[in-house]
Image (cartoon, rainbow, N blue to C red):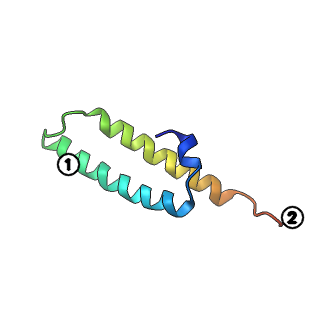
């Protein structure tokens, strides 16, 4: 996923996507451990997607609110 596409999503949507990706990552790790995962690059790609989502969520969390000084 591209960060640009993720930035267009809402916080709630990102949170649900994060939970889904965490489940996928767990599944990939188990398949890799049992030698059933054919494309091991999925582990790295999924971890990076998860990190992108975490980064965007933290950025939005730390943004100053609109009318405050």
Marker disc for residue 6: none
Q: Residue at x 18, y 45 (%)?
A: 31
Q: Residue at x 55, y 41 (%)?
A: 3
Q: Residue at x 63, y 52 (%)?
A: 59
In the image, 6 versus 57, the foreground residue is 6
Q: In the image, residue 23 lies at what x, y percent?
A: 31, 56
Q: Which residue is mark 1?
A: 30
Q: Residue furthest right?
A: 69
Quadrant in which the C terminus appears: bottom right
In the image, 33 versus 24, the foreground residue is 24
Circle 2 crowding by C-alpha within 10 Å: few under 14, some 14–19, many from 20: few
Of the residues under marks 1 and 2, which one precedes in the sequence?
1
Vertical position of residue 63 compared to residue 2: above or below: below
Circle 1 crowding by C-alpha within 10 Å: few under 14, some 14–19, many from 20: few
Q: In the image, residue 8 lies at what x, y percent?
A: 59, 50
Q: Secondary structure at mark 1?
A: helix
Marker disc for residue 69: 2
Task: Give residue 22's quadrant in the image.
Answer: bottom left
Q: Secondary structure at mark 2?
A: loop
Q: Residue at x 37, y 43 (%)?
A: 46
Vertical position of residue 67 compared to residue 38: above or below: below
18 to the left or right of 40: right
Total numbered labels placed on residues in the image: 2
Q: In the image, residue 13 lies at what x, y percent?
A: 49, 60
């Amino acid at each position: 996923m591209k960060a640009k596409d993720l930035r267009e999503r809402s916080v709630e949507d990102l949170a649900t996507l994060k939970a889904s990706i965490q489940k996928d990552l767990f599944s990939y790790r188990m398949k890799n451990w049992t030698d059933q995962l054919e494309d091991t690059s999925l582990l790295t790609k999924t971890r990076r997607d998860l990190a992108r989502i975490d980064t965007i969520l933290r950025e939005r969390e730390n943004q100053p609110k609109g009318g405050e000084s």
